[in-house]
Amino acid sequence: MSEPQICPICRVKIIKLVGGDRVIFSSGPPGTRETLWQKVCKYTDQPGCINRK
Ligand SMILES: [Zn+2]
């Protein structure tokens, strides 16, 4: 398995998985890149974010 990426802006871990990446939040259940976008990245909206649309 590959090393998790950590978004320097949102501070969440993204683990690359076949069939869809898994996002580990600091609290709550893991989600997807889409839930990360909806919960965090949409609001931070900075160029350094690795989960930008
Ligand atoms: Zn981010």
Image: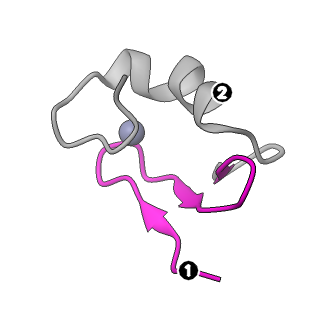
In this view, the residue farthest toward the front is 19
Q: Is residue 34 magenta?
A: no
Mark 1, other Cα within 10 Å: few <14 / some 14–19 / many ≥20:
few
Distance between mark 1 and mark 2 Cα atoms: 21 Å
- Specify start and end residues of the magenta stretch as a single range: 1-24
Q: Quadrant of residue 31?
A: top right
Main SS class of the magenta portion in the image: loop
- Which residue is disc 1 drawn over? 2
Q: Is residue 6 magenta?
A: yes
- Which residue is disc 2 drawn over? 35
Q: Secondary structure at mark 1?
A: loop
Disc 1 marks a residue whose amino acid type is Ser
Where residue 20 appears, as percent x and y from the top left, is 70, 46
In this view, the residue farthest toward the left is 47
Where residue 12 appears, as percent x and y from the top left, is 51, 52
Q: Nearer the viewer, mark 1 or mark 2?
A: 1
Where residue 45 appears, as percent x and y from the top left, is 27, 22
Classify 25 as above or below 2. Answer: above
Q: Is residue 42 left or right of residue 48?
A: right
Question: What's the residue at 43%, 53% (across, down)?
Answer: 11
Q: Secondary structure at mark 2?
A: helix
Question: What's the residue at 51%, 25% (across, down)?
Answer: 37
Q: Are marks 1 and 2 in contact (CB under 8 Å)?
A: no
Q: Quadrant of the C terminus?
A: top left
Q: Is residue 14 left or right of residue 42?
A: right
Considering depth in this image, is 9 or 47 the residue closer to the camera?
47
Q: Which mark is residue 33?
A: none
Which quadrant of the render holds ligand 1? Answer: top left
Q: Is residue 48 left or right of residue 8?
A: left
Decide if ligand 1 comes within 8 Å of the CB at mark 2: no
